[in-house]
Image (cartoon, helix red, strand yellow):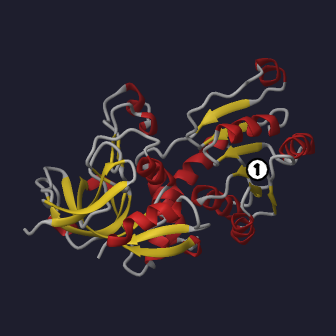
Amino acid sequence: MTPMRAARLHAPRDVRVDEVPVPTPQPGEVLVRLDRVGVCGSDVHLFRGDRPAAYPLIMGHEGLGWVEAAGGGVSPDRVGDRVVVEPNVPCGVCAWCRRGRGSICPNKRSLGVNAPGVLAEYVTIPSSHAWAIDESLPWQEAVLIEPLAVAVHALSVSRLEPGDGAVVLGCGAIGLLLTQLLATVRVNAYAIDLDLRRVEAARRAGAVEAAVMTGEAAPGLAERLRRDGAWSVVFECSGTASGAAWCLDAAPRGGTVVLLGLAVETIPLQPLRVVREGITVVGSIIYDHPDDFRRTIRLVHDGMRVGHLVEHEFSLQEVERALVDAGGVLAGKAVVRVR
């Protein structure tokens, strides 16, 4: 087979489209021919050098394509399946995996992070992590299944019920998907961001209330939400330490703070208030295999439509621009067309 094109990160802000060998599927794996790939905030952080990486690294993890070949032990009937890639592969044997918590497996293989990613013409993945989807599903919907699964997992962690209220801080792709998911399951969402365009996108996604929050107004808004009593869960989706601190300030008595953002800085915490007011703080990272992806695909096949969040499509040769724009000028989702 001729070499394939792949977007490889050689150093911070140095991404190149190189020719590399096409991978060979091992037993239990399939070879996926990629069609489109979503650009995630974590890709932007890797590109900027905010997270460590073993260079050169094939980037990307939100992949959509078709099964091109099957490794040993995989049914040949899988060839030709249109699939969405579940890019985090837990080890399956550690204590956390045995408890069904593969999302926090310390040994997991993560495409585009510690293993070759999907910003390439081909990738290999365990057959169990190549989820078949309908050919009729528009690519704009299908390419967002992976980040939507992140929102589905966060919702399950929150234990929200229909009729409850939740605050979503940060209206990037995950925050917007979470806002729409909350609306879909009849949870009232209050969406907050610094960017008016994203706040407007949150309103279109189904937020019952939405606000642009400036630094000066942040303490007053946190106090108002805390005293309101209508918002029992606060989701942190901004990925900033200041956002996490604000969410703790905004949490009501008996409420829950769900942290999705991956800020590395420390923040102050007053144990007295957490204990006295019965506040729960919980982390939510990626998703647990296989239940969260299964639920997500069912939601999309049943009619949940999120493709309106796709703002711009780039070619593989434009991958550097896609990464820069995703971390700056775009309010919606950036997608790379591989073919």
Task: Tell me what residue is drawn at x 80 percent, y 37 percent.
Answer: 251
What is the residue that sits farthest to the top in this orientation?
272
- Which residue is found at the position 80% from the left and 53% from the top? 213
The quadrant in which residue 195 appears is bottom right
Q: Which residue is mark 1?
A: 167
Q: Quadrant of the N terminus?
A: bottom left
Which residue is at a point 84% across and 21% down the rendered structure image? 276
Residue at the limit of the structure toward the bottom, as seen here: 136
Q: Badge 1, how many Cα within 10 Å: few under 14, some, many 20+?
A: many
User: Horizontally, is 51 left or right of 23 in the view?
Assistant: right
Q: Is residue 175 visible?
A: yes
Confirm whether residue 32 shows in the render.
Answer: no
SS at circle 1: strand
Q: Is residue 172 left or right of residue 196?
A: left
Where residue 246 sits in the image (x, y, percent)? 76, 39
287 w.r.t. 253: above or below: below
Q: Is residue 158 left or right of residue 44?
A: right
Q: State whether residue 266 is above or below residue 102.
A: above
Residue 187, horizontal then vertical, whole percent? 75, 56
Screen quadrant of the C terminus: bottom left
Residue 264 in the image: x percent, y percent? 56, 33
Q: Tell me: residue 283, above or below residue 48.
A: above
Residue 110 image-quadrant placement? top left
Q: Which residue corresponds to the image point at 73% horizontal and 56% vertical from the top-left? A: 194
**Mark 1 residue type:** Val
